[in-house]
């Protein structure tokens, strides 16, 4: 039977049904058509659409030189959909990025997350520090900054970092918890009261990070509830063959 290739969908299907070599070549050559996004602003592009884009696409849609603000926003949204291997976390951060206003607490927090994502393997790996601490402890070496730095530099050479490592929700939330401890330490050290501007700023930072955790847990619970309902439904209605 001759396969008709009257449109793009039929053509794609036809090529995928040939040989394995052709299938691999065709799949790798397929690229999302961004022409449908040309008249949209960055916030109008959906999560799923951003998933199909790369940075070159964004530069084509929103040239940095002529559309700096649009380019910055599109890049931030694109980063969020790819920031981790956890789709729920990506969705939460994407939605936060859509809603955030310039110069507010959330903008700084999301900017911090973007910064960490660029070097996540380095930001989260303390293996050389742990090795140094263990080595000094086991060998009864008195602690000093100079000695620790000397040994740590040698330990650093034994650590292999994974440049493709992406953050997990647990790691990000651990950083949030450490941020909270830091803000609370500042409040206590400087004896800030609820009337102080710094106290209010620190509490707002804590609250914003907590809102990300809460949104993540809500989405996770919703997904689990949907999965449980689907599982119960399929078990109570078996398909007879």
Image (cartoon, rainbow, N blue to C red):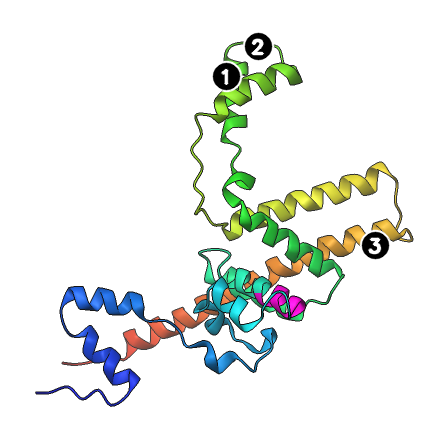
In this view, the residue farthest toward the left is: 1
- Left of 44 or right of it: where is 233? left
Residue 231 at x, y = what percent? Answer: 34, 71
* Residue lying at 70% horizontally and 60% vertically, measured from the top left: 106
- Left of 225 or right of it: where is 66? right
Which residue matches tag 1?
135
Q: Is residue 234 above or below residue 200?
A: below
Which residue matches tag 2?
141
In this view, the residue farthest toward the right is: 195
Q: Count the labels in the image.
A: 3
Residue 35 at x, y = what percent? Answer: 47, 80
* Residue lying at 64% horizontally and 48% vertically, measured from the top left: 176
**Residue at disc 1, secondary structure:** helix
Residue 48 at x, y = what percent? Answer: 46, 72
* Residue lying at 57% horizontally and 63% vertically, measured from the top left: 75
Q: Which residues are magenta?
A: 67-74
Q: Name the quadrant of the C terminus.
A: bottom left
**Residue at disc 2, secondary structure:** loop
Q: Is residue 47 above or below residue 206?
A: below
Marks 1,2: beta carbons within 8 A? yes
Could one spot residue 238 in this view of the protein? no
Which residue matches tag 3?
200
- Left of 113 or right of it: where is 184? right
Label 3 neighbour load within 10 Å: few <14, some 14-19, many 20+: some
Mark 3 and mark 1: span between their CA atoms?
A: 43 Å
* Residue lying at 20% horizontally and 75% vertically, measured from the top left: 15
Q: Is residue 190 above or below residue 130?
A: below
Q: Is residue 177 above or below residue 44?
A: above
Picture quadrant where residue 153 is located:
top right
């Amino acid at each position: 039977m001759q396969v008709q290739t009257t449109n793009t969908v039929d053509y794609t299907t036809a090529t995928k049904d040939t040989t394995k070599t052709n299938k691999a070549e065709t799949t790798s050559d397929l690229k999302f058509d961004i022409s449908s996004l040309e008249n949209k602003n960055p916030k109008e592009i959906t999560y799923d659409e951003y998933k199909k884009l790369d940075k070159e696409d964004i530069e084509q849609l929103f040239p940095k030189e002529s559309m700096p603000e649009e380019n910055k926003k599109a890049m931030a949204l694109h980063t969020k959909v790819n920031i981790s291997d956890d789709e729920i976390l990506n969705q939460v951060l994407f939605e936060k990025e859509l809603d955030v206003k310039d110069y507010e607490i959330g903008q700084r927090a999301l900017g911090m997350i973007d910064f960490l994502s660029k070097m996540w393997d380095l930001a989260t790996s303390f293996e050389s520090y742990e090795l140094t601490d263990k080595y000094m402890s086991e060998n009864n070496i008195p602690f000093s900054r100079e000695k620790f730095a000397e040994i740590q530099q040698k330990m650093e050479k034994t650590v292999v970092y994974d440049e493709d490592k992406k953050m997990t929700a647990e790691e990000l939330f651990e950083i949030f918890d450490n941020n909270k401890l830091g803000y609370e330490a500042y409040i206590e050290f400087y004896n800030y009261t609820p009337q102080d501007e710094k106290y209010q700023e620190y509490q707002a930072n804590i609250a914003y990070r907590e809102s990300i955790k809460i949104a993540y847990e809500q989405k996770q619970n919703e997904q689990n509830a949907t999965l449980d309902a689907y599982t119960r439904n399929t078990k109570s209605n078996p398909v007879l063959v």
